[in-house]
Image (cartoon, rainbow, N blue to C red):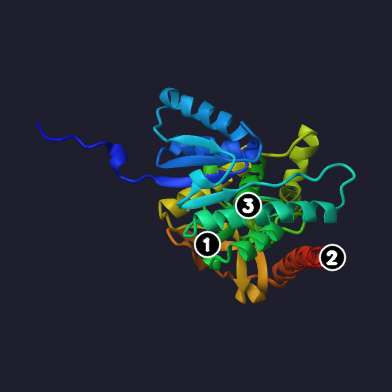
Amino acid sequence: MPEQTSSRSTRRLKVTVVGAGMVGGTVAQLLAQRDYADIVLVDIVEGLPQGKGLDLLEAGPVLGYDSMISGANSYEESAGSDLVVITSGIARKPGMSRDDLLRTNMGIVRSVTEQVASSSPEAKVIVVSNPLDAMCHVAFDAAEFPRERVIGQAGVLDSARFRTFIAQELDVSVRDVSAFVLGGHGDTMVPLSRYSTVAGIPITELLPVDRVRALEERTASGGAEIVSLLKTGSAYYAPGASVVEMVDAILLDQKRILPSSIYLEGEYGISGLFVGVPVKLGANGVEQIIEISLTDEENRALRKSASAVQDLVDAMDRLSTES
């Protein structure tokens, strides 16, 4: 009888998710169901990543996946990860100033990234922590990785919201809707309606100007709308799904064109800032930054969004000096 070899003899891809909260847990769940990578959940809360990891592992026989999911309070188990998702950080609480939030999350993301870079020096990093574009700067500086390997997740989520609202407005399947959003992750994001289509038809030809504007405004406040409904939390299903779409694109080398926050070095006339733009994601991380032509109005909106990111970066520089 020929010798049988285990399918486990071939190294599986490895993904570490830092932060076992609602977003991190959702990322781990959706990724486990993909069944092509093993997952390590890392969190400072004793028992939380271990408990969620075991719960997800025990769902495997029911849902039919063999992904190994483990939890840890340190980074030893994460060593050698192909990709790391950073969701760590706190949400802004009542009475908390922007500077307080920045100071706290700067420290968390910097510490996490330094440990990630040490244990997984070849990994690609997807940052999800808020404020997103500012935390990308922290991770980029702490990791000292090439810019192609530090990517912020925001545009996929914002575009998903835009697509949802377009589909609802026109009573069509979301599968026929394409859309993307430029700029920072916040009120100044730039939904590009001119490039957003239903079965290839621009929505500007299907809807009056006022309805297009209303959809853009709802997209820009999409996160706040969910926070106001939940009252004690923020979105996690759509953010988690958006992260996994990016993970798929990178680890499966899909060459997907997805809007992502990336450190720009002159593209779109912007230098030295993480700003959301369409990029090609593949095995090397960001493999191409796609530059599209913008109208004067769209350019002004993108500059305004980049200026908002710059304000956060300047605030972090000031806080770092003060400390």
The relative height of residue 126 versus residue 295 in the rendered view (above or below) is above
- The amino acid on which the numbered mark 1 sits, given as a three-letter code, is Arg
Left or right for 174, reference 300:
left
Instruction: Give how far apart the Cα atoms at labels 1 and 3 are.
Output: 16 Å
Tell me the residue that label 3 is attached to: 112
Residue in the foreground of this view, choosing between 321 and 207: 321
Secondary structure of residue under mark 1: helix
Tell me the residue that label 2 is attached to: 322
- The amino acid on which the numbered mark 3 sits, given as a three-letter code, is Val
Instruction: Give how far apart the Cα atoms at labels 2 and 1 are.
Output: 30 Å
The relative height of residue 105 versus residue 307 in the rendered view (above or below) is above
**Image quadrant occupied by the N terminus:** top left
Whether residue 167 is visible here, answered yes or no, is: no
Whether residue 228 is visible here, answered yes or no, is: yes
Residue in the foreground of this view, choosing between 197 and 41: 41
- Neighbour tally class for label 1: few under 14, some 14-19, many 20 plus, Cα within 10 Å: many
Estimate the x, y position of residue 162 in percent, counting from the top left: 65, 48
User: Which circle marks residue 83 in the picture?
Assistant: none
Secondary structure of residue under mark 2: helix
- Neighbour tally class for label 3: few under 14, some 14-19, many 20 plus, Cα within 10 Å: many
